[in-house]
Image (cartoon, helix red, strand yellow):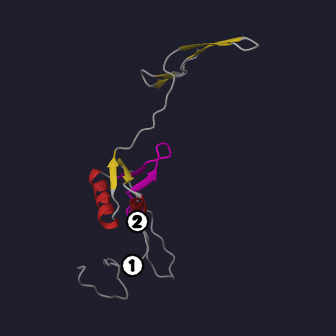
Amino acid sequence: MHSSQMEDVDEIPAGHIGAMFGIDCASGDTFVSPAINYSMLAMHVMEPVISLSIVPKDNKAQINMSKALNRFTKEDPTFKTYVDHETGETIIQGMGELHLEVYVERMKREYKAEVATGAPRVAYRETITQKALFNYTHKNRPVARVSTVVWPDFWNPVTKTLNLSTR
């Protein structure tokens, strides 16, 4: 089978390989006669091992990047994409650094989407790590004084484990 030599056939026997183009489908789709109602088992797809943040250079690149990501996720089950709701970044995930580089280059070449890549940002959260005293005097009438102590409960920041002992 060569891409320059196409041959129309009415059927493909079991064990033979055929190619089709112009069909709206995704990886893992099963093609059978309309009279037969078969479906194949889903493929086992490994979880992605690497993530990369992508940012479009301009609005036109944003539109083209969106089209490219939709197509790539449809044709490759190991390629995943999502928008991180905490940082607002578009994250792509794949099976390796080269895997993601190929898709970024395809975005630039096939879709004319200029994008910048980088490591995903981490959304940091603050927490209480040590005992803290709080004193406040309310000076308006009625005068009140508030005093309290705040400390981390059940969490040991040194060993990063839960402390289940009672206090």
Q: Which mark is residue 22?
A: 1
Sequence-first disc among 1 and 2? 1
Q: Please check the rendered image and state whether residue 38 is part of the magenta-colored stretch, yes or no.
A: no
- Image quadrant in which the N terminus is located: bottom left
Q: Callout 2: 10 Å neighbours few (<14), some, many (20+)?
A: few
**Residue placed most toward the observer, 152 or 162:** 152
Q: Position of residue 46 (x, y in %)?
A: 38, 53
Quadrant into which the C terminus falls: top right
Disc 1 marks which amino acid? Gly
The type of residue carrying mark 2 is Arg
Magenta part of the protein: which range? 72-94
Element on which disc 1 rests? loop
- Where is residue 66? Give x, y as percent: 43, 61
Please tell me which residue is depicted at 53% across the width and 20% down the height of the picture: 152
Task: State whether residue 73 is above or below residue 89.
Answer: below
Res 102 quadrant in image: bottom left
The x, y position of residue 131, in whole percent, is 52, 14
Circle 1 Cα neighbour tier, 10 Å, few/some/many (<14 / 14–19 / ≥20):
few
Tell me where residue 58 appears, x and y as whole percent: 39, 57
Determine if the magenta segment contains residue 87: yes
Looking at this view, name the residue that lies furthest to the right: 142
**In the rendered image of this protein, does residue 1 appear above or below residue 8?**
above
What secondary structure is found at the residue carrying circle 2?
helix
Q: Is residue 75 above or below residue 91?
A: below
Quarter of the view holding residue 145? top right
Contact (Cβ within 8 Å) of mark 1 with mark 2: no
Residue pointed to by mark 2: 71
Q: Residue at x 71, y 12 (%)?
A: 144
Badge number at residue 155 = none
Instruction: Measure the alpha-carbon separation of dots 1 and 2.
Output: 14 Å
**Is residue 55 rendered to the left or right of residue 166?**
left
